[in-house]
Image: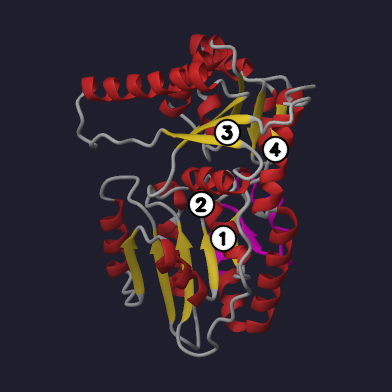
Amino acid sequence: MTGDTRRPRVLMLGPLPPPVGGMATVVSNLHRALAPRLELRVLNNVKTTARDRSLLQGIGAQLRLLARLGWQCLAWRPAVVHIHTCSWFTFWRNGVDVLLARLLLRRVVLHIHGAQFHHFLGGLTGTSAWFARRLLRAAQRVIVLGEGWRDVLSGWVDPVRIAVVPNGVPSGGQVEPSPTGPFRIICLANYEVRKGQEDLLRVVARLDAARPVRLELLGFEAEPGRRQALLDLAAELGLAHVDIPGPVTGKDKEARLAAAHCFCLPSYDEGLPMSMLEAMAIGLPVVATRVGAIPEAVDEVREGLLFEPGDVDALATHLQRLIDDPAAARAIGAAGRARLMRDFSLERSAELVFEVYRALDH
């Protein structure tokens, strides 16, 4: 990518919105931030077939996507193919993309997003472990979201090839939540067991607050029946002020975040959650678990309140503190926003990705 006055060509492979999810948001944000500096194309690999598709329909869709990747590599000849991936089937499917791009003499950057990637690797043995190592080592660079993820991957690929690039989001204006009315807790996370929404519902039911508490659980139903299970639990606990509407995007999501008093993510596994960063960007105080790269993004107590997954007593203590002490909540939110703007802005994330591309020449 050096020694050429033309803008380098990069082909990015990953999902684009409207699907709800952190990886789609990352791909969309990076595309917007990097486009002025690169000739950048995004090959959208989001699932387009119905959930009840036949095996032949699924294979056909994957072969068409693979053919598009091959054609772009041959006809457009990008300097870099940047592939976004996560755990389980997605990793194996993207492994075929890696091998095809390398076969066509393209340099590959593999970007790991999966919150459960450590579980995925830890469950591999024998032939599957051998093949995973070969796929990871086929990429010239492997991007991870934090130093903890570098440690996870270092046993699978040469650490020299691993680059840490935290997710980044555009910075927003500082919110000023209403001092009257309900205390609003917002959780942006797909409806699945590992996200810990049941813990949050049980904690909200036991809070002792002088003002009403309203809880919003916004997300896509990643596990069939999970939304109804959460609605049933809320009814069982007698929670009248709980909203579980499903996915909320765009201006509606922004308005709900701006009206909230705190953001809570009680997950059991995470990478570096985009929803948390979006909350920090507007100055919402964050209550989250010590998983994935979250402890690297939040200085505990000063910039956010962290707890161990499943520790409902600690979660209750943190939320009670924010309800009882609005000044502390504002200070934590402001400190989190300052940290976001310094270390997790979209501009910094895009610059680090660009440096990964440039490093491929050396």
Residue 297 rendering spot, x and y as whole percentages: 69, 53
Question: Which corner quadrant of the image does residue 50 belong to?
Answer: top left
Residue 38 rendering spot, x and y as whole percentages: 63, 37
Q: Residues within 10 Å of mark 2 (few under 14, many from 20)?
A: many
Q: Which residue is mark 4?
A: 354
Asked if residue 64 lies left or right of residue 40, the reply is left
Mark 4 or mark 2, which is nearer the start of the sequence?
A: 2
Q: Which residue is mark 1?
A: 278
Magenta-drawn segment:
291-316
- Quadrant of the frame with the C terminus: top right
Question: Which corner quadrant of the image does residue 58 belong to?
Answer: top left
Mark 1 residue element: helix
Q: Residues within 10 Å of mark 4 (few under 14, many from 20)?
A: some
Give me the C-alpha separation between circle 3 and circle 1. 20 Å
Asked whether 314 falls inside the magenta stretch, the response is: yes
Mark 4 or mark 1, which is nearer the start of the sequence?
A: 1
Q: Is residue 38 visible?
A: yes
The image's mark for residue 112 is: 3
Residue at image coords 34%, 70%: 243
Mark 1 or mark 3, which is nearer the start of the sequence?
A: 3
Give me the C-alpha separation between circle 3 and circle 2. 19 Å
The image's mark for residue 267 is: 2
Asked if residue 182 lies left or right of residue 59, the reply is right
Give me the C-alpha separation between circle 4 and circle 3. 16 Å
Vertical relation: 87 (above or below) 71 = below
Dots 1 and 2: beta carbons under 8 Å? no
Mark 3 residue element: strand
Residue at image coords 54%, 11%: 104
Q: Amino acid at mark 4?
A: Phe
Mark 2 or mark 3, which is nearer the start of the sequence?
A: 3
Q: Amino acid at mark 1?
A: Glu
Residue at image coords 26%, 34%: 49
